[in-house]
Amino acid sequence: MTNNDKTIPTKFRYSFMRVFFIICLSLITYCATAQVTLLKLDELDKRMANGKDTTYVINFWATWCSPCVAELPNFEKLRLANLKKPVKVILVSLDFKSKLQKEVIPFVLNNKINAEVFLLNEPDQQAYIERIDKKWSGAIPATLFVNKKARRFYEKEFTETELKNTLLNLK
Amino acid sequence: MKRLILVAFMLISGFAFAQTEGYKVGDVVKDFSLKNVNNKMVALADYKDAKGYIVVFTCNTCPVAKAYQERISALNATYAAKGYPVVAINPNDAGAVPDESFQKMQALASEKKFNFPYLLDPDHVVTKQFGATRTPHVFVLNKTDKGNVVEYIGAIDNDPEEANSTKVEYVKNAVNELSIGKKPAIASTKAVGCGIKWKKG
């Protein structure tokens, strides 16, 4: 009896440890590969519709766009300054879908980008450019500020101060 | 403070407006003379038999422009014989991006066997005249008694990554329509491309 009492918990402990180990491993691989996921505009719209009082700052960029890459740290600063506020910074890459694994994910990892990053999964740019903003020529960087009350689109580069002020003045 | 922000916004919007200056559909294009990768000067007027032109602002380094290289060659292969040759212009400054140099343009043109002129635009003079803002950026011109009239501005097609099942070939359609004496049904389109690498200072 006493023997059995000892062996059963040990067995359990082993299997627990194994399960725990597997979960850890899969979490690590998940984190390393799931930095950037594909995004449809419908999904983005749905998220904004369910966002309640959240203001979304959505930056459109690409790894090949040097002014975009240059302003990314400003978005990180905005994100950090608003962690406790209902503000969500989202980076939407317009890189080719085929570059997701080879270029976009390594770029995000190497540059330690902690904001949410997506790669836009829309085949027809004529359609998605118009949908994001009628005035947009398609040039990047471009940034959309949106909440339940306001929607402002800017086809320009932002400094840290400009980002902060645009967010503050969003009515 | 609010007034200051307002002034800042006005300045920014003014700047954005200045950036979008250039030819509109219907404008007559001023001819230019730019150096080709073979060191010879090329002007639109050199093409005595042309009925029009496919002017493409493209470059060496932009991934979007690269994705379109073969399609630009194919456009010239199809339409040069019909009187609408491709004239490619690199709008970028080699001082800003060394890989945009004239030597690198020559290397690319010979490697990819460009069957069309690939012209250098020092100081962005022609780029600014046209109002090109990115690569690739296309202007389809129609030769008339008034001069070369802009009939289409925008993207080559709506399928940069060759993954769009509802592909529309804007430039092909525009040239086909012009060649039968019609105005292009779609005269301007938008596209994501690489911004122009302007000369610094």
Image (spheres, coloured by chain):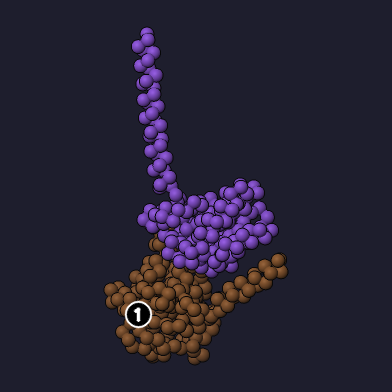
Chain colours: A purple, B brown
Residue B27 is situated, as x and y percent measured from the top left of the image, at: 54, 84
Task: Tell me the quadrant of the picture where the C terminus of chain A can be found.
Answer: bottom right
Label 1 chain ID? B
Residue nearest the observer in this picture, A145 or B161: A145
Residue in the image at 68% along x and 55% along y: A149
- Which residue is situated farthest in the top direction here? A1
Q: Secondary structure at mark 1?
A: helix
Residue A12 is situated, as x and y percent measured from the top left of the image, at: 39, 22
Residue in the image at 50% along x and 60% along y: A72
Q: Is residue A42 visible?
A: no
Residue nearest the observer in this picture, B178 or A164: A164
Rendering quarter of residue B83: bottom left
Residue in the image at 30% along x and 73% along y: B112
Residue A28 is situated, as x and y percent measured from the top left of the image, at: 40, 42
From this view, report whether residue A52 is shown above or below residue B99: above
Task: Tell me the quadrant of the picture where the N terminus of chain A can be found.
Answer: top left
Residue in the image at 49% along x and 88% along y: B30
Alpha-carbon neighbours of circle 1 within 10 Å: few (<14), some, or many (≥20)? Answer: many
**Residue type, mark 1 in image:** Phe
Looking at the image, residue A170 sits to the left or right of residue A42; the answer is: right
Q: Which residue is mark 1?
A: B102
